[in-house]
Image (cartoon, helix red, strand yellow):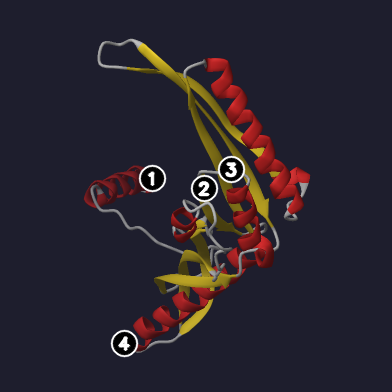
Amino acid sequence: MKRYLPALLAALLAVAALGLAGCQTKVVTSPGGGAPIDTVTAQGNGKALTAPDKAEMTFGVSITDSDAKRALDRASTTARAITDALLSAGIAKDDIQTAGITLFPQRDNSNHVTGYSSSISVRAVARDFAKLGAVIEAATKAGATEIGGPSFMVSDDNPANDKALSAAVDDARKRAGTMAKAAGKSVGRIVSVSEAGVQSPGPIYDQRFMASARSRGAAAPPVEPGSMETVAQVTVVFELK
Protein backbone atom coordinates (compact mmCIF):
# COMPACT_ATOMS: atom_id res chain seq x y z
CA MET A 1 0.00 0.00 0.00
CA LYS A 2 2.87 2.35 0.82
CA ARG A 3 4.20 2.08 -2.68
CA TYR A 4 1.07 3.75 -4.01
CA LEU A 5 1.33 6.82 -1.72
CA PRO A 6 3.90 8.79 -3.75
CA ALA A 7 1.88 8.31 -6.92
CA LEU A 8 -1.33 9.32 -5.14
CA LEU A 9 0.28 12.40 -3.66
CA ALA A 10 1.60 13.47 -7.07
CA ALA A 11 -1.85 13.05 -8.59
CA LEU A 12 -3.47 15.19 -5.88
CA LEU A 13 -0.91 17.95 -6.39
CA ALA A 14 -1.55 17.94 -10.14
CA VAL A 15 -5.29 18.29 -9.59
CA ALA A 16 -4.75 21.16 -7.19
CA ALA A 17 -2.53 22.92 -9.71
CA LEU A 18 -5.17 22.56 -12.41
CA GLY A 19 -7.82 23.94 -10.09
CA LEU A 20 -5.75 27.06 -9.39
CA ALA A 21 -4.94 27.73 -13.04
CA GLY A 22 -6.09 31.24 -14.10
CA CYS A 23 -6.19 32.58 -10.51
CA GLN A 24 -3.46 35.14 -9.65
CA THR A 25 -2.82 37.12 -6.49
CA LYS A 26 -0.74 40.35 -6.58
CA VAL A 27 0.75 41.48 -3.30
CA VAL A 28 2.02 45.10 -3.05
CA THR A 29 4.52 45.71 -0.32
CA SER A 30 6.30 48.77 0.97
CA PRO A 31 9.61 49.75 -0.62
CA GLY A 32 11.45 48.03 2.23
CA GLY A 33 9.66 44.76 1.60
CA GLY A 34 7.39 45.07 4.66
CA ALA A 35 3.62 45.13 4.94
CA PRO A 36 1.58 47.05 2.35
CA ILE A 37 1.02 50.74 3.14
CA ASP A 38 -1.79 53.10 2.26
CA THR A 39 -0.75 56.25 0.44
CA VAL A 40 -2.20 59.49 -0.90
CA THR A 41 -0.75 61.39 -3.87
CA ALA A 42 -1.01 65.17 -4.15
CA GLN A 43 0.32 67.85 -6.43
CA GLY A 44 1.64 71.09 -5.00
CA ASN A 45 2.36 74.51 -6.46
CA GLY A 46 4.84 77.03 -5.10
CA LYS A 47 5.92 80.54 -5.99
CA ALA A 48 8.85 82.79 -5.15
CA LEU A 49 9.40 86.45 -5.95
CA THR A 50 12.84 87.74 -6.87
CA ALA A 51 14.09 91.25 -7.52
CA PRO A 52 15.90 91.48 -10.90
CA ASP A 53 19.52 92.58 -10.72
CA LYS A 54 20.23 93.48 -14.34
CA ALA A 55 18.47 94.86 -17.39
CA GLU A 56 19.29 94.39 -21.06
CA MET A 57 18.75 97.13 -23.61
CA THR A 58 19.25 97.24 -27.38
CA PHE A 59 20.10 100.48 -29.19
CA GLY A 60 20.09 100.62 -32.98
CA VAL A 61 20.40 102.97 -35.92
CA SER A 62 19.28 102.62 -39.55
CA ILE A 63 20.77 104.67 -42.36
CA THR A 64 19.63 104.89 -45.99
CA ASP A 65 21.98 106.16 -48.70
CA SER A 66 22.34 105.90 -52.47
CA ASP A 67 25.81 104.39 -51.95
CA ALA A 68 26.30 101.12 -50.02
CA LYS A 69 29.65 102.10 -48.48
CA ARG A 70 28.36 105.45 -47.31
CA ALA A 71 25.30 103.80 -45.74
CA LEU A 72 27.48 101.38 -43.78
CA ASP A 73 30.01 104.06 -42.84
CA ARG A 74 27.32 106.41 -41.55
CA ALA A 75 25.69 103.65 -39.53
CA SER A 76 29.09 102.64 -38.12
CA THR A 77 29.84 106.20 -37.08
CA THR A 78 26.57 106.47 -35.18
CA ALA A 79 27.03 103.03 -33.60
CA ARG A 80 30.44 104.12 -32.28
CA ALA A 81 28.88 107.28 -30.88
CA ILE A 82 26.22 105.18 -29.14
CA THR A 83 28.89 102.90 -27.66
CA ASP A 84 30.88 105.88 -26.38
CA ALA A 85 27.72 107.35 -24.85
CA LEU A 86 26.95 104.07 -23.07
CA LEU A 87 30.46 103.95 -21.62
CA SER A 88 30.19 107.55 -20.45
CA ALA A 89 26.81 106.77 -18.85
CA GLY A 90 28.35 104.06 -16.68
CA ILE A 91 27.93 100.84 -18.67
CA ALA A 92 30.99 98.58 -18.35
CA LYS A 93 32.86 97.73 -21.54
CA ASP A 94 32.29 94.00 -20.99
CA ASP A 95 28.54 94.66 -20.85
CA ILE A 96 28.43 96.22 -24.33
CA GLN A 97 28.15 94.02 -27.41
CA THR A 98 27.43 94.52 -31.11
CA ALA A 99 24.10 92.75 -31.62
CA GLY A 100 23.81 92.92 -35.41
CA ILE A 101 24.97 94.57 -38.63
CA THR A 102 22.91 94.57 -41.82
CA LEU A 103 23.33 96.07 -45.28
CA PHE A 104 20.85 95.42 -48.07
CA PRO A 105 19.68 97.11 -51.28
CA GLN A 106 16.37 98.88 -51.62
CA ARG A 107 14.44 98.19 -54.82
CA ASP A 108 11.50 99.77 -56.60
CA ASN A 109 8.57 97.99 -58.22
CA SER A 110 10.72 97.25 -61.27
CA ASN A 111 13.32 95.56 -59.07
CA HIS A 112 15.84 98.32 -59.74
CA VAL A 113 18.19 99.22 -56.89
CA THR A 114 17.31 102.69 -55.61
CA GLY A 115 19.61 102.82 -52.61
CA TYR A 116 21.01 100.92 -49.66
CA SER A 117 19.96 100.54 -46.06
CA SER A 118 22.36 99.71 -43.25
CA SER A 119 21.47 98.96 -39.65
CA ILE A 120 23.67 98.39 -36.62
CA SER A 121 22.43 97.51 -33.13
CA VAL A 122 24.30 97.56 -29.84
CA ARG A 123 23.29 95.48 -26.82
CA ALA A 124 24.01 96.78 -23.32
CA VAL A 125 23.51 95.28 -19.87
CA ALA A 126 22.78 97.75 -17.07
CA ARG A 127 23.40 96.61 -13.50
CA ASP A 128 22.59 99.88 -11.79
CA PHE A 129 18.91 100.63 -12.36
CA ALA A 130 19.33 104.12 -10.97
CA LYS A 131 21.42 104.95 -14.05
CA LEU A 132 19.25 103.15 -16.62
CA GLY A 133 17.13 106.19 -17.45
CA ALA A 134 20.25 108.24 -18.06
CA VAL A 135 21.70 105.44 -20.20
CA ILE A 136 18.63 105.47 -22.44
CA GLU A 137 18.75 109.24 -22.71
CA ALA A 138 22.47 109.23 -23.57
CA ALA A 139 22.08 106.59 -26.30
CA THR A 140 19.17 108.50 -27.81
CA LYS A 141 21.13 111.75 -27.93
CA ALA A 142 24.04 109.86 -29.54
CA GLY A 143 21.83 108.93 -32.48
CA ALA A 144 19.96 105.75 -31.53
CA THR A 145 16.68 105.67 -33.43
CA GLU A 146 15.63 102.16 -32.48
CA ILE A 147 15.53 101.13 -28.82
CA GLY A 148 14.34 97.85 -27.34
CA GLY A 149 13.85 96.89 -23.74
CA PRO A 150 14.60 96.95 -20.98
CA SER A 151 14.36 93.24 -20.31
CA PHE A 152 14.83 92.65 -16.60
CA MET A 153 16.65 89.48 -15.55
CA VAL A 154 18.07 87.61 -12.56
CA SER A 155 21.70 86.52 -12.65
CA ASP A 156 21.26 83.56 -10.27
CA ASP A 157 17.81 81.96 -10.11
CA ASN A 158 18.80 78.99 -7.91
CA PRO A 159 17.68 80.54 -4.58
CA ALA A 160 14.28 81.39 -6.04
CA ASN A 161 13.94 77.88 -7.49
CA ASP A 162 14.70 76.32 -4.11
CA LYS A 163 12.19 78.54 -2.34
CA ALA A 164 9.46 77.79 -4.89
CA LEU A 165 10.08 74.03 -4.65
CA SER A 166 9.90 74.13 -0.87
CA ALA A 167 6.61 76.03 -1.04
CA ALA A 168 5.29 73.49 -3.55
CA VAL A 169 6.02 70.57 -1.18
CA ASP A 170 4.24 72.41 1.64
CA ASP A 171 1.26 72.96 -0.63
CA ALA A 172 1.19 69.26 -1.57
CA ARG A 173 1.22 68.29 2.12
CA LYS A 174 -1.72 70.61 2.78
CA ARG A 175 -3.71 69.12 -0.10
CA ALA A 176 -2.86 65.58 1.01
CA GLY A 177 -3.95 66.43 4.55
CA THR A 178 -7.35 67.55 3.29
CA MET A 179 -7.85 64.29 1.38
CA ALA A 180 -6.59 62.19 4.28
CA LYS A 181 -8.98 63.88 6.72
CA ALA A 182 -11.89 63.18 4.40
CA ALA A 183 -10.88 59.50 4.47
CA GLY A 184 -10.66 59.47 8.26
CA LYS A 185 -6.87 59.27 8.32
CA SER A 186 -3.84 61.53 8.67
CA VAL A 187 -0.74 62.21 6.59
CA GLY A 188 2.49 60.51 7.54
CA ARG A 189 5.96 60.48 6.08
CA ILE A 190 6.80 61.24 2.45
CA VAL A 191 7.12 58.07 0.39
CA SER A 192 8.31 59.79 -2.79
CA VAL A 193 8.51 63.25 -4.31
CA SER A 194 9.14 64.30 -7.90
CA GLU A 195 9.55 67.65 -9.57
CA ALA A 196 6.91 68.30 -12.20
CA GLY A 197 8.51 71.50 -13.40
CA VAL A 198 10.09 74.81 -12.41
CA GLN A 199 9.54 77.93 -14.46
CA SER A 200 12.35 80.33 -13.75
CA PRO A 201 11.72 84.01 -14.35
CA GLY A 202 12.41 85.03 -17.93
CA PRO A 203 13.02 88.53 -19.20
CA ILE A 204 10.33 91.09 -18.38
CA TYR A 205 9.97 93.69 -21.08
CA ASP A 206 8.74 97.23 -20.58
CA GLN A 207 7.44 98.66 -23.84
CA ARG A 208 7.25 102.21 -22.45
CA PHE A 209 10.91 102.80 -23.21
CA MET A 210 10.51 101.81 -26.85
CA ALA A 211 7.98 104.61 -27.29
CA SER A 212 9.93 107.20 -25.29
CA ALA A 213 13.10 106.55 -27.30
CA ARG A 214 11.53 107.80 -30.51
CA SER A 215 11.94 111.34 -29.29
CA ARG A 216 15.58 112.44 -29.59
CA GLY A 217 15.37 115.06 -26.87
CA ALA A 218 13.27 113.02 -24.45
CA ALA A 219 14.11 113.25 -20.78
CA ALA A 220 15.41 110.17 -18.96
CA PRO A 221 12.46 107.80 -18.56
CA PRO A 222 11.64 106.35 -15.12
CA VAL A 223 12.62 102.75 -14.37
CA GLU A 224 10.50 100.41 -12.26
CA PRO A 225 12.06 96.90 -12.27
CA GLY A 226 9.39 95.39 -10.00
CA SER A 227 9.79 91.70 -9.10
CA MET A 228 10.00 88.41 -11.00
CA GLU A 229 8.07 85.24 -10.21
CA THR A 230 9.37 81.67 -10.16
CA VAL A 231 6.75 78.90 -10.23
CA ALA A 232 7.35 75.27 -9.23
CA GLN A 233 5.16 72.15 -9.25
CA VAL A 234 5.79 68.84 -7.48
CA THR A 235 4.04 65.51 -7.09
CA VAL A 236 4.33 63.97 -3.62
CA VAL A 237 3.24 60.57 -2.33
CA PHE A 238 2.51 60.51 1.43
CA GLU A 239 1.89 57.59 3.76
CA LEU A 240 -1.56 57.46 5.32
CA LYS A 241 -1.80 56.71 9.02
Q: Report the residue marked by disc 1.
A: 6
Tell which circle, 4 or 3, labels the residue nearer the N-terminal end. 3
Instruction: Please tell me which residue lies in front, 186 or 121.
Output: 121
Between the C-alphas of marks 2 and 3, the distance is: 11 Å
At label 1, the amino acid type is Pro
Closest to the camera, between mark 4 and mark 1, is 4
- Please say if 60 is above or below 69: below
Q: Report the residue marked by disc 2.
A: 147
Residue 129 visible, this angle: yes
Secondary structure found at label 2: strand
At label 3, the amino acid type is Gly
Residue at left 24%, top 46%?
18
Residue 157 visible, this angle: no
Between the C-alphas of marks 4 and 1, the distance is: 57 Å
Between the C-alphas of marks 2 and 1, the distance is: 96 Å
Residue 188 at what x, y percent from top left? 51, 81
Labelled disc at residue 143: 3
Tell which circle, 4 or 2, labels the residue nearer the N-terminal end. 2
